[in-house]
Image (cartoon, coloured by chain):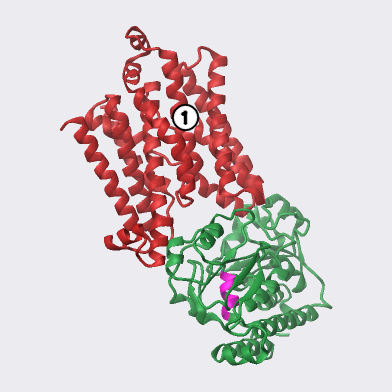
Amino acid sequence: MFPTDPKRRIPIAAALAAALLAGCGGRADDRARGGAAADSSVSVTDDAGRTVTLPRPARRIVALVPAATETVIALGAGERLVGRTAYDRGVMVERLPSVGGGLDPSIEKLVSLHPDLVLGWETTGRTELRDRLTALGIPVFSVKLEDTTDVFRSIRSLGRLTGRTDAADSLATAIRGELDAVRASVAASPRPSVFFLVWNDPPMTAGPKTFVSQVIEIAGGRNAFADQAALWPNVSLEEIVRRQPDFVVVPIGEQGTVRLEALKTSVGWRELRALREGRGVSVPSQVVNQPGPHLAEAARAVRDAIHPELRGR
Amino acid sequence: MKPLARLALLAAIAVAALLVAVRLGAVPLSLRQVMDGVRGTADPTTVAIVRRLRLPRAVLAAMVGGSLAASGATFQALLRNPLAEPYILGISGGAAVGAVFAIALGGTLASAGVVGVAALAGAVFAVLLVFRLAAVVGRALDTRILLLAGVVVGAFFNACILLALTFADADAFRSAIFWMMGSFSGATWRGIALLGAAMVPGMTLLLALARPLNLLSVGEETAAYLGTRVERTKLLAYGTASLLTAGAVAVSGVIGFVGLVVPHVVRMLWGPDHRFLIPASVLLGAAFVVLADTLARTAAAPTELPVGVVTAFVGVPFFVWLLRRRAA
């Protein structure tokens, strides 16, 4: 999962360590900075355009968005998570009670956990869940995580909501640095076209406005379907075959879609030269499908998959 | 047992079902906590769970169950068809088209209220379309033609839904599918008040039509000989039953089998007299749906099953048994 070269991990590891250390003695550095003092109120505009005001930084958080859960943990505020969704994995959250799905959690279960902040999906227009929780006196901060800009904004917002702006800044800086390193490493390489497989039946891929597509570009590839308008467009198998992408990238893991081997022999897909010639590659889905703190790791994983000659650089 | 005593028993069952529904959930509560929650003397979390989440949800489930069962019984009498159910004339298809289009195309405008109104509009449109078709083909309100028109309109609406879903994004797709599976999770006191304003008069009217429905279920000519104003009764009954179904669909999506199964159970236990059948169906339908929703909330907690899944799991075996019994 982690690149083998320890040097590469240092910036993020350092940022995480700093965040975790700060988390242990959080109060002192907050007060020293005078920015978000531990008990002063915070106001942040969420991705639905609403201003969410907390009387003090959140102490009991339920994140309905797995990537937001990861971000809270990366900011060193993992101890403040009091619930998780059925889709959250990881040592930090497995002990927590589940509230069900992220889009349709059990409101009862949520209420009973007494959260002082719920991080929910920004579901365009369908505000039932948000309205219910708000009516029950629980502040809801809606998160939209479509592209990399959204990811960095969410890190900043969550930093403010948890009173950990310093940790958020250093995390964002570390991720940016890592992304730049990946970008620099492929600067001189050719840019192969990449078909990113979100789902195999019906075939679905990542549109140009998604973080996945941007990660592919950073990793030195071209999204074979960069001409699509939809976020996650359904595309016909015929069209994929017609475009003959240089690489087929398949996320594999707990949320994985289809086994690469099965794909190579299945009707239609076997017409892809990339799959026949061993350029069907897998990436860890837990890393690549998560618009959160693992963004740089995702870029590195994709880069290693489509530029194997650069592995470890 | 006298009919009134039976109704009292059914009412007691419905109340017991409501009580069970308020006690059970993702967070289990004792009877004591439920009582304090209703009175508002429990801790704030319990009060919120009881008063603002569970109680409105159980009441809504009861209202929808009662409405569906009453309109199912009415459609079975009017169409003289044991397989008739509230959605038989394409109401569910119409409502689903309204809701799915609102969800898929509405984007930022598709709040729960908008989806409900769109579903209601779709349901009313479906009813009008079916009756219009039947009127064009021949005698208005001819049973066979109505059934055919219902099937045709339903098939057309299904095609529209599939078309809308083809172009919907993943979020909208998921919402639409969930809507079609039916749920009471959107229950609010305001919605209940609105629905009650339509449902209470509707059910009262069906009760008043019990005697003519008795005659109609024997046959239209017989009913006419015995002094029933057949066309007027049919129009009123069709209209009322359709309105009840449309209201139910608008607030909770499509919930199957209640309207089909409950009136049959009542008939088998206590005979086909509509003066008893309709109120008994209302009470039994209410109890059935409340318990089905309780099961839906608790079986896989904290994940909620769609209530339509639970009613179908109970309904399908019953349906098969009913068919076999009729074949024998």
Chain ID, green in image: A
Q: Taking A279 as reference, is B326 above or below it?
A: above
**Image quadrant containing the N terminus of chain B:** top left
Q: Residue at x 73, y 85 (%)?
A: A313
Q: Taking A225 as reference, is B282 above or below it?
A: above
Q: Residue at x 70, y 64 (%)?
A: A210
Residue B269 as seen in the image, left or right of residue A166: left
Residue on which the image places disc 1: B242
Instruction: Count neighbours of disc 1 (C-alpha within 10 A) and say few if under 14, some if 14 to 19, many if 20 or more.
Output: many
Residue B276 in the image, given as x and y percentages of width and height = 27, 28
Q: Is residue B253 visible?
A: no
Q: Farthest right residue?
A: A188
Is A39 inside the magenta-drawn segment?
no
Q: Taking B211 as reference, is A159 above or below it?
A: below
Q: Is residue B26 visible?
A: yes
A94 or A105: nearer the viewer: A105
Quadrant housing residue B220:
top left
Residue B233 in the image, given as x and y percentages of width and height = 41, 18
Residue A113 in the image, given as x and y percentages of width and height = 44, 70
Q: Taking A137 as reference, is B152 above or below it?
A: above
For chain B, the rendered hue is: red
Residue A23 as seen in the image, left or right of residue A228: left
Q: Count of labels shown? A: 1
Residue B151 as seen in the image, left or right of residue A277: left
Q: Residue at x 43, y 71 (%)?
A: A97
Residue B156 as seen in the image, left or right of residue B56: right
A275 or B17: nearer the viewer: B17
Q: Which residues are magenta?
A: A66-73
Quadrant housing residue B81:
top left
The amino acid pointed to by label 1 is Ser
B143 or A311: nearer the viewer: B143
B106 or B31: nearer the viewer: B31
